[in-house]
Image (cartoon, coloured by chain):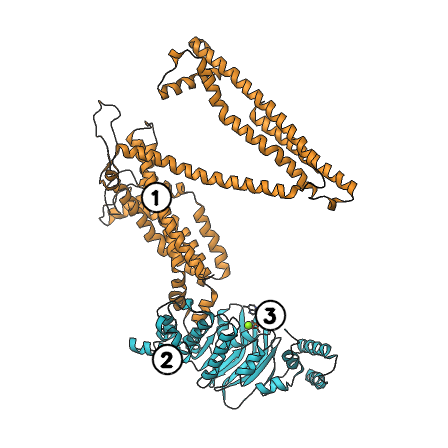
Amino acid sequence: MSNSKLSQSISTDGADPKISEQVLDVEKDLLSMESYSTIGNNLVEDAKMSVRNVNVFYGDKQAIFDVHMDIKKNEVIAMIGPSGCGKSTFLRTLNRMNDTIDSCVVSGEVTMDGENLYDPKLDVVELRARVGMVFQKPNPFPKSIFENVAYGPRLHGLADSKVDLDELVENSLKKAGLWEEAKDRLHQPGTGLSGGQQQRLCIARAIAVEPEVILMDEPCSALDPIATARIEELIEELSQNFTIAIVTHSMQQAARVSHRTAYFHLGKLIEVNPTETVFTMPEHKLTEAYITGRFG
Amino acid sequence: MQTSTLVLFLFVIAVFAFYSSQNRSISIAGKLGGIRKLSSLPSYYGTYSVLLTLVPVLLFISLWISLDQLVIERLVVEKIPKEYVPLNTSDYQLMINKIMSISGGIIKNDSVPSWQLDAAVRMRQLSVISQWSITCLSIFMASILVYWGFRRVSENFNARPVVETIMERMLLASACIAIFTTIGIIFSVLFESIQFFRKVPLFDFIFGLEWSPQTAIREDQVGSSGSFGAVPLFVGTILISLVAMVIAVPIGLMSAIYLAEYANTSVRAFAKPTLEILAGIPTVVYGFFAAITVAPVLRDFGESVGLDIASESALAAGAVMGIMIIPFISSIADDVISAVPQSMRDGSLAMGATHSETVKRVVIPAALPGIVGGILLAISRAIGETMIVVMAAGLAANLSINPLDAVTTVTVQIVTLLTGDQEFDSAKTLAAFALGLMLFVVTLMLNIFALQIVKKYREQYE
Ligand SMILES: Nc1ncnc2c1ncn2[C@@H]1O[C@H](COP(=O)(O)OP(=O)(O)O)[C@@H](O)[C@H]1O
Ligand SMILES: [Mg+2]
């Protein structure tokens, strides 16, 4: 089967001057392959979420091919890969945000604590409260800072009184490291904050409903280095209480914040390994090519 | 030559100018070794020649035409014996018109006094002279300019920036015409209104509760001296607009929400053009519909439930006006709702909100300023709407806030005041201008306010 071809090309010496050509060959093989298997430890013992056999289509176009993967409880897992390889699409299967795109069809099984997320009887609204999401571009609602954070709790009836709500908002802002900057301007518009602050506001908003998992889709790509560093610190703190899956285009970021790293290529999950392994001794030729900067 | 023929002939000259200059530039280029040696492309030399010829000559002609009537009139009147020239402006105008008619052959020559005949003959002669001079002068001018343009073609003369500048000036001139026309209209309304306020105090007009503009035409006639309190008209206008808004705002808004948020592409593809067709129906058709269908149905319905509904009720006119405004509101609201970034919806959905919660709590609040702006624009349209109310609202200036009564509006009164035979400086006629001015001021303020809101809203997402 084609897998043998893959491992063949992988065993070739990395210093070979013809390496780019070989990488291209591997990529070509990958395209033509009917089935493939992910390299590394994509499956773990105590999984928070399990993804099996997942394929995602946009109309006729397949964006994700047969992905098997587990996300461990309280880990930070980074997803990297060239743009257009399906990282965002994959991330969105985890909270069923793909449902909002008409042409998008997901097949396979995604479970969280053993419960099938694609069960027709499952309440999507409740699921999204349990799996929060932070987007690439900070998207605070055009409301006050307070109202932004209170949005989820109000929606799900998490606070019974004004005092409860105040406390909840304060705690969320504190956890998101925004309290000191925001406490004097809680009732001013969230859109008036700086980009980095807005993104932390979005994180505060997401954690205000106490999700179990937080998905982050390139949360720092619109931010400057200092704001990025703050968010990265924050991710580290949050990982004590939450399970985090983060898509990033910055390999340094993946190396800094994540415990495991998953490498996607052309909609296929190529390799999942502890982050250190991925960035020091990648197993797959394509992973290596990517982290050494041979793909965009 | 007739002026229209002359202009046509000038265009022929312009075509000639274009080709001669273009060809000359091409032949110069040929000698130098290619078009690249020229400072501009050949067509620019042609265009330059055309503009050089047409712009001054056409300006000259229009100046001549606007002045020659005046000059001829002066020259004719000069020769008329003093005792026949009236001092009063309107009689003077009457005399001029008469002379013009005679010289144009509209009035038979044999039945008029000889001094008028002389004047008419003189007028005729002068216009012929004027016609000939303008023909000769402009053709002469055009020939010189064509020749000049032709001579200027050379490899060093860069026609492109010159053409660019002239084009820019012409566009500027067009913009100015539009603006000055508007200003002109405003001023003419303003001056007539000032005349009106000399006869009727401003205070009485704005706060007066009674509107009956019938004034006696002759001193000895019986009848009221007219009262010009505009309050009933404005109350009527507001009442009808309010009825229209009560109908148009909810329906327009909800259809916009459906179209922008829920409808799939095929429904949208069908519904949007349909709404636009609704917006394209001439208001006179709506007026018909209001007067002939809606009003009787409402009155019959009222009778059957024991309500007394006037056959020209504010309700009927307002309802139909509301229907007219629905597409207006729904299209603006649709635009502003669609302009709310998808990331807002995603953010809300990802928090576990349902679609309708997202619409209610995020999309509508985000779009609200734009929607309010749209509604204000719609109100200003309703206030200025004329045809529907002329046909359906009636003339009785009742001061009433009951939509089942017959009321009248500012626009209806302007129409009735100005149709039919009128003395142009009577208070009755001038009142129309005052009403127009009020209407203009109100809608202008509404529009400025609304556009301000809409603009602010746009900036929010930029
Ligand atoms: N809404 C959509 N409709 C159709 N195709 C899409 C849509 N979103 C993404 N795709 C396609 O799916 C593939 C994966 O996209 P995406 O998940 O956004 O990649 P990444 O986040 O890794 O850059 C791309 O080829 C993209 O063109
Ligand atoms: Mg992406």
Q: Are marks 1 and 2 in contact (CB under 8 Å)?
A: no
- Camera-near label (2 vs 3) is 2
- Specify the chain shown as orange: B
State how far apart marks 3 and 1 are (Cα). Answer: 58 Å
Q: Which callout, 2 or 3, points at the residue further toward the start of the chain? A: 3
B433 versus B280 height, above or below? above
Whether label 1 lies within 8 Å of ligand 1 gets the answer no
Name the amino acid type tagged 2: Asn
State how far apart marks 2 and 3 are (Cα). Answer: 43 Å
Name the amino acid type tagged 3: Lys
Residue B50 marker: none
What chain does badge 1 belong to? Answer: B
- Camera-near label (3 vs 1) is 1
Side (left or right) of B306 relative to B276: left
| Residue that carries the numbered disc 2 in the rendered image | A171
Q: Colour of chain A?
A: cyan
Asked if badges 3 and 1 are on one and the same chain, I answer no
For mark 3, give the secondary structure: strand
The front one of B29 and B111 is B29
| Residue that carries the numbered disc 3 in the rendered image | A61
| Residue that carries the numbered disc 1 in the rendered image | B441
Name the amino acid type tagged 1: Val
